[in-house]
Image (cartoon, grey):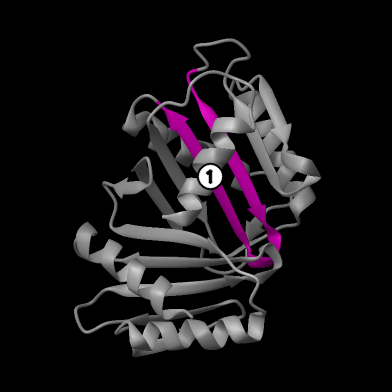
């Protein structure tokens, strides 16, 4: 998916280290309360305390990259993205073994969220996936991100329209930044408007992976 390609490219080229391993794990915490400076500080400390030697903040923004060692084999690469306005922390880890990538992403995200200045806004939810290239496996959740310059009001309108047109018209729910719904087969979907970061986030939960991936594509296609 588009955003996964973006993450892979960032991990590949932004950190000066060795060849990219094939497996990625992503762990996402939502409904959190923090400011980006606290999150970035927590990310840097967590990465350093977990053996990452090359920790770099990307262009003074809200993304931190790290390589496990300065010299190969580096064992892990990692990316932490702090989205304070949306209450989301995204952690991506790269490793030679899928299970290791997934566990490392989960562990790093959990530790970051335990840091001072980061708290639960309401009920937190977490997504953990193992990814080969751009495809997620061993999870009941599929997700993707796309870049978008659309404003928040239009984004929320488009999100509802996309959910309805994609069959997620049951039990529609809304919060400040997202719209969610369920289809007749029990799949759940949410579209988040991360307009401060010029992104739209799509998520489908439940059932078969092939169906989820197809539904994600429908949500993306029907958004505009």
Q: Position of residue 188 (x, y in %)?
A: 33, 74
Near mark 1 (Cα within 10 A), the count class, few <14, some 14-19 or many ≥20, is some
Q: Is residue 19 above or below residue 45?
A: above
Q: Residue at x 40, y 74 (%)?
A: 221
Residue in the picture at 50% in, 66% down: 201
Vertical comparison of 147 with 177: above or below: above
Instruction: Report the side of 70 relative to 26 (left or right).
Output: right
Q: Position of residue 98 (x, y in %)?
A: 33, 33
Q: Residue at x 50, y 24 (%)?
A: 76
Judge whether 189 appears above or below 60 on screen: below
Residue 86 forms part of the magenta stretch: yes
Instruction: From the viewer's side, name the closer residue of 9 and 49.
Output: 9
| Secondary structure type for disc 1 | helix
User: Which residue is rendered at x = 55% and y = 50% of the image?
Assistant: 90
Q: Quadrant of the N terminus?
A: bottom left
Instruction: Please indicate whether residue 74 sits to the left or right of residue 215 in the image.
Output: right
Q: Give the prevailing secondary structure in the magenta stretch.
A: strand
* Residue 178 in picture, x, y percent from top left: 53, 77
The magenta stretch is 75-95
- Let me know if residue 82 is in the magenta part: yes
On screen, residue 211 versus residue 4, left or right, reads left
- Residue 80 visible within the image: yes
With respect to residue 68, does 199 lie above or below?
Answer: below
Find residue 218 and report its image quarter.
Answer: bottom left
Q: Quadrant of residue 65?
A: top right
Q: How far across and how far down the image is residue 74, in percent?
A: 52, 16
Is residue 118 rendered to the left or right of residue 107? right
In this rendered view, identify the residue nearer to me: 111 or 184: 184
Q: Is residue 206 visible?
A: no
Which residue carries the number 1 mark?
7
């Amino acid at each position: 998916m588009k955003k996964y390609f973006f993450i892979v490219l960032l991990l590949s080229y932004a950190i000066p280290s060795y060849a990219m391993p094939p497996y990625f794990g992503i762990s996402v915490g939502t409904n959190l309360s923090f400011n980006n400076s606290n999150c970035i500080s927590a990310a840097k400390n967590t990465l350093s305390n977990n053996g990452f030697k090359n920790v770099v903040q990307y262009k003074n923004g809200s993304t931190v990259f790290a390589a496990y060692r300065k010299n190969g084999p580096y064992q892990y690469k990692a990316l932490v993205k702090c989205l304070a306005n949306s209450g989301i922390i995204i952690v991506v880890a790269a490793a030679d073994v899928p299970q290791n990538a997934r566990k490392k992403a989960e562990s790093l995200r959990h530790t970051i969220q335990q840091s001072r200045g980061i708290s639960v806004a309401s009920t937190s939810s977490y997504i953990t996936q193992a990814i080969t290239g751009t495809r997620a496996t061993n999870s009941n959740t599929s997700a993707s991100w796309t870049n978008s310059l659309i404003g928040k009001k239009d984004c929320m309108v488009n999100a509802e329209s996309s959910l309805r047109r994609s069959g997620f018209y049951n039990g529609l729910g809304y919060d400040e930044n997202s719209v969610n719904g369920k289809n007749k087969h029990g799949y759940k979907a949410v579209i988040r408007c991360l307009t401060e970061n010029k992104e739209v986030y799509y998520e489908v939960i439940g059932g078969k992976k092939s169906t989820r991936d197809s539904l994600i594509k429908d949500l993306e296609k029907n958004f505009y």
